[in-house]
Image: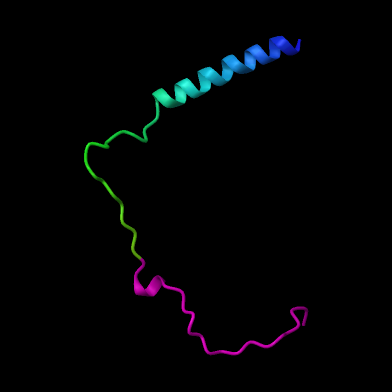
């Protein structure tokens, strides 16, 4: 029983990874250097210069 399970799992993994490698789209369109550059504009930057002092407050008020 365990031998049969191991054989089917091995065949399943081989078929799964073979299909995934053959049908992968990661390498498509790699003829040129197509780099994606992400930038953060000023209005999206977090504001760390907040001068408000927070004190311990009870959240159950």
Extreme residue toward the left, this view: 32
Q: Is residue 3 left or right of residue 20?
A: right
Drawn side of residue 32 relative to residue 52, left or right: left
The span picked out in magenta is 40-61
Residue drawn where x is 22% and y is 36% of the image = 31
Q: Relative to 21, say whether 44 is above or below.
A: below
Look at the picture and state if 30 lies above or below 21: below
At which x and y percent is residue 46? 46, 74
Quarter of the image where the C terminus is located = bottom right
* Viewer-proximal residue among 57 and 12: 12
Q: Which quadrant of the view contains residue 21? A: top left
Q: Is residue 58 above or below residue 30?
A: below
Residue 1 x %, y %: 76, 10
Q: What residue is drawn where x is 46% and y is 79%?
A: 47
Q: Is residue 4 left or right of residue 24?
A: right
Q: Which residue is painted at 27% across and 37% down in the image?
A: 30
Quick check: is 59 in the magenta stretch?
yes
């Amino acid at each position: 029983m365990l031998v049969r399970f191991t054989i089917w799992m091995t065949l399943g993994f081989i078929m799964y990874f073979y299909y995934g490698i053959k049908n992968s789209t990661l390498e498509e369109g790699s003829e040129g250097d197509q780099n994606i550059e992400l930038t953060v504009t000023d209005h999206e930057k977090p504001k760390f210069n907040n001068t408000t002092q927070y004190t311990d407050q009870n959240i159950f008020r």
